[in-house]
Image (spheres, helix red, strand yellow):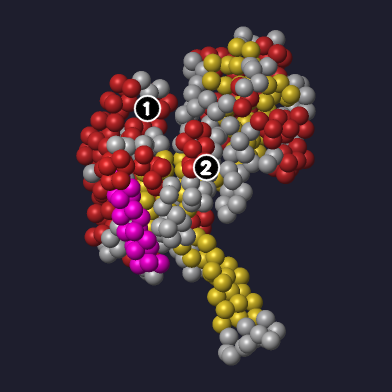
Amino acid sequence: MAVLDKSLREELEQIGRQARKASDGLRSMTRALKDDALLEVAKRLRASKAALQAENKKDLEAGREKGLSSPMLDRLELTDARIEAMAEGLEVVAALPDPVGDIVSQTVRPNGLRIAQIRQPLGVVGIIYESRPNVTADAAGLCLKSGNAVVLRGGSEAIHSNIAIAKIFIEGARSAGVPEHAVQIITTTDRGAVGEMLKLDRYIDVIVPRGGKSLIERIYDDSRIPVVAHLDGICHTYVHSSADLAMAKAICLNAKLQRPGVCNAMETMLVDQSVAEVFLKDIAGDFASADCELRGCERTGAILDCVPATEEDWRTEYLDKILSIRVVDSLEEAIGHINEYGSHHSDAIVTENYSAAERFLDAVDSATVYVNASTYFTDGFQFGLGAELGISTSKLHCRGPMALKELTSLKWVIRGDGQIRT
């Protein structure tokens, strides 16, 4: 066993060294070269649809044998639309402004020093993710455009799909002139690879994890490298007393049922007591038709046939067709519930009252907050960012969808003409 660990450690060290070397070349790469590479990869992804789906089929079959849930299998599947979305996402990223070299601020001091802050790549980004193979293309594309080398470590459940996408990306980027090893993928499914990767602080500048709570907690505990976390998506929709109930119904059904297994799906629905009876009786049939289990507070149970909700339900990201419902007395109670039990990811209010909307936007401490729209929109592509590495729920460096600007740091550039400090 010791020999295997040593071999794995050496393999990861080599990947780290290669990534660091590649990052030096990426810093000075022109926008035109980066954009040409992204467009070439997009073209190759479309042309390789059949091959990608053949590899994806292996993962889906293995997932069914392991008993993965329907939402998990949905996250794993590479449909025609999702392959097209990967390609389109790269094209959108190519069309976006290059953040590298942007002047964030500049000033001239009384002594004549000209001081500026400019955007620079982070260097080497490590991505650890589960389930969704489209992350492979999204992450590689964003890192390339922002001048970062990337080391990808996807979950074992998507290993064939991830390797196939990465191979297309690497070959397409190299053909356009991107430095070798700018994009690398760890191909072993050995769980020890994550632990070794988290020790590569000499080579990797930041770790971005995307996955379940246990994975994120492990990375926080074990990493020597700074972590930008994508934590739970315990997302809420609050139906206010002044809500247009038809709008509220459409928003809540979309937020919960469009894709229950994603992090921006609604997990708890809060309903103002003044509209609770009418609204809950109207929407319950739609949830029942979709086989969505309802878990409600005592007042919800007096209106609907539902499973009694426990304290733990308010803190749970189901990622499935399960919904917690709580009837609240006021806007302030709804805000208090969200700030106490939520994961600071995505939360929405449905209301026709301007003051209530503004109070919600100001008081809810989440990365993304909505008025009269579904939380399912929390997504880099939907926000015009091309793609995302994840939805950061931390407050340092970046918050919300992590895209091009969030993959840069700042450098102070000072120009003088002989000044000395006395």
Residue pictured at 77% horizontal, 32% vertical: 332
**Of all residues shown, which one is farthest toward the front?**
2
Look at the numbered disc 1 and give the secondary structure of its residue.
helix
- The quadrant of the picture occupied by the C terminus is bottom right
Look at the numbered disc 2 and give the secondary structure of its residue.
helix
Report the label total. 2
Q: Which residues are magenta?
A: 8-27
* Residue 89 visible at all: no
* Residue 338 visible at all: yes
Q: Nearer the viewer, residue 174 or 368?
A: 174
Residue type at numbered disc 2: Tyr
In the rendered view, tell whether residue 89 sits above or below residue 188. below
Q: Nearer the viewer, residue 342 or 329?
A: 342
Q: Where residue 182 appears, x then y in whole percent?
A: 33, 58
**Of all residues shown, which one is farthest toward the bottom?**
418
The residue to which callout 1 is attached is 73
The residue to which callout 2 is attached is 220
Q: Where residue 357 appears, x then y in whole percent?
A: 72, 39
The label shown at residue 263 is: none
Mark 1 surroundings within 10 Å by alpha-carbon count, few (fewer than 14), some (14 through 19), many (20 or more): some
Residue pictured at 36% horizontal, 47% vertical: 152
The mark nearer the N terminus, 2 or 1, is 1
In the rendered view, tell whether residue 3 sits above or below residue 151. above
- The quadrant of the picture occupied by the N terminus is top left
